[in-house]
């Protein structure tokens, strides 16, 4: 009898949000310097990655990257350096991704499991905050135009 266990092959987690990449990027950039999430999975967005091209029509030129730190819970709280990536998913949707920058073991370690659990929780909070911020920015722009 062979038993298979689902083991993640990557430490990249992502969520798709119903925002254009321009609206999502503006909202994400406005969150730099803030802490998002709870103590069990707190994401601090530190700085916009300056390697990111800001103009152009290609897929990669429309990618926004922000460096940050993910604080994981546990008896001995740890942190992992991460990169938040925002890419166009379609004309009306965008993908938010979170990737560990440091070296983490891919298979079955407590550290990688804690990272994946915290990354998923923090990314849920970040996606919700990006949508709220984009909606607030849109409402503010509509009030200013009126």
Image (spheres, rainbow, N blue to C red):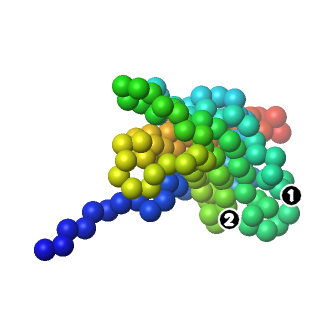
Helix, strand, or loop for circle 2?
loop
In the picture, measured across the screen, residue 90 lies left or right of residue 3, that is right
- The image shows residue 116 at horizontal and vertical percentages of 43, 47
Q: Is residue 104 visible?
A: yes
Q: Is residue 23 visible?
A: no
Give the CA separation, mark 2 to mark 1.
Answer: 16 Å
Helix, strand, or loop for circle 1?
loop
Q: Are marks 2 and 1 in contact (CB under 8 Å)?
A: no
Residue at the outermost left position: 1
> Quick one: quadrant of the C terminus?
top right
Q: Residue shown at 43%/47% (left/top)?
A: 112
Quadrant of the image occupied by residue 90: bottom right
Quadrant of the image occupied by residue 136: top right
- The image shows residue 84 at horizontal and vertical percentages of 63, 47
Q: Residue shown at 69%/34% (left/top)?
A: 46
Disc on the earlier residue, 2 or 1:
1
Residue at the outermost bottom position: 1
Q: Residue shown at 61%/48% (left/top)?
A: 101
Crowding around mark 1 (Cα neighbors within 10 Å: few <14, some 14 to 19, many 20+) is few
> Quick one: quadrant of the N terminus?
bottom left
Crowding around mark 2 (Cα neighbors within 10 Å: few <14, some 14 to 19, many 20+) is few
Taking depth in this image into account, of 2 and 30 the one nearest to the observer is 2
Taking depth in this image into account, of 50 and 133 the one nearest to the observer is 50
Q: Residue shown at 36%/43% (left/top)?
A: 110
In the picture, measured across the screen, residue 122 lies left or right of residue 69, that is left
Q: Which mark is residue 55?
A: 1
- Report which residue position mark 2 lands on: 91
């Amino acid at each position: 009898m062979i038993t298979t266990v689902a083991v993640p092959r990557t430490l990249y987690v992502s969520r798709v949000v119903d925002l254009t990449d321009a609206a999502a990027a503006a909202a994400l950039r406005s969150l730099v310097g803030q802490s998002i999430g709870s103590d069990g999975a707190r994401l601090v967005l530190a700085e916009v990655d300056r390697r990111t091209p800001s103009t152009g029509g290609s897929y990669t030129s429309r990618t926004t990257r922000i460096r940050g730190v993910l604080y994981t819970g546990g008896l001995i709280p740890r942190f992992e350096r991460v990169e938040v990536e925002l890419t166009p998913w379609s004309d009306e949707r965008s993908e938010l991704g979170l990737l560990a920058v440091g070296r983490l073991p891919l298979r079955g370690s407590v550290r990688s499991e804690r990272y994946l659990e915290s990354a998923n929780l923090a990314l849920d909070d970040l996606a919700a905050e990006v949508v709220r911020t984009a909606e607030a920015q849109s409402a503010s722009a509509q009030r200013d135009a009126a």
